[in-house]
Amino acid sequence: MAAGTGTSTGSATAGFVLPTLAAGQFLMALDSSVMNVSIATVADDVGTTVTGIQGAITAYTLVMAMFMIPGGKVGALIGRKRAFMIGCAVYGCGSLTTALAPNLPVLLVGWSFLEGIGAALILPAIVALVAGNFAAERRPAAYGLVAAAGAVAIAVGPLIGGIATTYFSWRWVFAGEVVIVLGILFLTRRLADAPTEGRPRIDLLGAVLSALGLGVFVYGILRSGEWGWFLPKPDAPSWLGISLVVWLVLAGLLLIHLFLRWEARLVERDREPLVDPALLRNRQLTGGLVMFFFQYLVQMGVFFVVPLYLSVALGLSALKTGARLLPLSLTLLAAAVLIPRLLPGISPRRVVRIGILLLFAGAVVLLAALDADAGAEVVTVPLLLIGLGMGALASQLGAVTVSAVPDEQSAEVGGIQNAVTNLGSSIGTALAGSILIATLTSSFLAAVEQDPAVPAAVKSQAAVQLESGAPFLSDAQLTAALDQAGVDPARASAALDANAEARVDGLRAALAVLALAALLAMFFTHRIPTTPPGSPAPR
């Protein structure tokens, strides 16, 4: 299927359209990272625990995952521009509620529910509005900038959160989001709405099945670090001796299968589905979706591992950690914007392959550079490479997926695309975290076992505590814990050395898995087209 011609905006109008849509994407991504450096502060302020705030972040991810596909269909029902504006209004209400939240239940309503619903309406609408406001040949640059805005938000989120929490209050972040939402709504009047055909109806059963399937699947993945991927951790829920994560993932896959079967039955009866199963047989579309999955898996894994190294292993502040991530943001933005502008006729497949190789190279260089004695400077070159790779992918993939279908299906594709990126993000973070903790645990226990100065009872106690969920401890945290336990200086020094080596082993293992994931993605690039959207196909 070919994309429609789209609407080409004038340069003056485009000057408002792109910043408006990019600002929307920036806001949606910001909440995934901005409060990670301030969880303890937020917990104290609203009278809850760190686990409670982590639960709110998890709930935000779940709500987005559950309603992303139905959110894409709502755009076709009421208009993409209207869905975008309603989503912004709901998101703004959620941000205001969060900024004023006196306790955890109010925080959950504002941050997790209202902002999650708003994001599920906004993100698919952004995809459709780019298609509706730019001609096919201009879409790679537009999608590149919009995607880059989201990735930059994830990179600078810790810096923004650190500045706000250190010098003002975490509440000012959400108050600032309200102001940005008002600016976006003011500028949205300049947007041309994406065309819709007929009067679509929403498939309620399909919406329920897709929401439950994606929600259960993502929830299982998010709980893997706490419960264990297959074998349950001590005191973790299980069934038939197997971690509940396995059963949740299987239940989610079963519900998604039932959803697709139901959608196929609707098509057979000439009724309108929530998602046309024929879309998943579109070679170009599925190729783009697979690349999106791997991009976000590696991207979020890197954004999990690198800040941990900087803030915990090296003890950098939130501000310094955020500053060290800026090289990635700069190269990402440069690649996403400049590749379509300077090389408009280049093969998307070639750019995607180069992007994947850059992701792989960045992960490998960082893996090789990490050492117990290494400093913060070792992340600079790897982050420059990873940023270039992410920018290269961002410059092509949005246009690849949307150009695979007619413009009237762009919001539908947007819902699927954002659901896939949500899955990739969840799996990337969970996979990197679980590999890191498992390797850290085994490395630390091996070092302790080989130390004859450590009593057998202490070794046994360490094994039990670590297997129930090893913490990623800084030297300062471990020193405080050893002092409190009354450990003598010689043994404390040995424990600190073992912890430092184990941390590096865990980080290396996580990076190795992310590098392998990037390499695996290379085997799926043959589905990416060789001609840019809007260009005549080769004879």
Image (spheres, grey):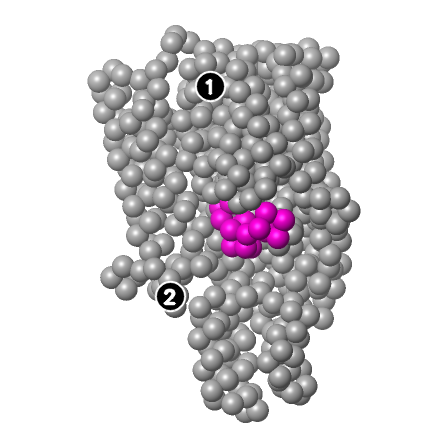
User: Would residue 243 be seen by someone viewing this image from the given angle?
Assistant: no
Q: Amino acid at mark 1?
A: Gly
**Looking at the image, which residue sits at the far bottom?**
452
Other residues around mark 2 within 10 Å, as few (<14) / some (14–19) / many (≥20)? few
Q: Is residue 160 left or right of residue 469?
A: right
Q: Amino acid at mark 2?
A: Asp
**Looking at the image, which residue sits at the far right?**
167
Pick the residue in front: 274 or 282.
Answer: 274
SS assignment for the magenta stretch, majority = helix
Q: Is residue 133 above or below residue 354?
A: above
Label number found at residue 75: 1
Q: Give the quarter of the image for residue 468.
A: bottom left
For disc 2, the marked residue is: 235
Q: Magenta stretch: residue 45 in it?
A: yes
**Image: magenta residue range:** 43-58
How far across and down, in percent of the image, does residue 443 sit? 53, 74
Other residues around mark 1 within 10 Å, as few (<14) / some (14–19) / many (≥20)? many
Identity of the residue drawn at 71% across and 47% down: 165
The quadrant of the image that shows the N terminus is: top left
Element carrying mark 2? loop
Q: Earlier in the sequence, mark 2 or mark 1?
A: 1
**Looking at the image, which residue sits at the far top?**
198
Element carrying mark 1? helix
Q: CA distance from mark 2 to mark 1?
A: 44 Å
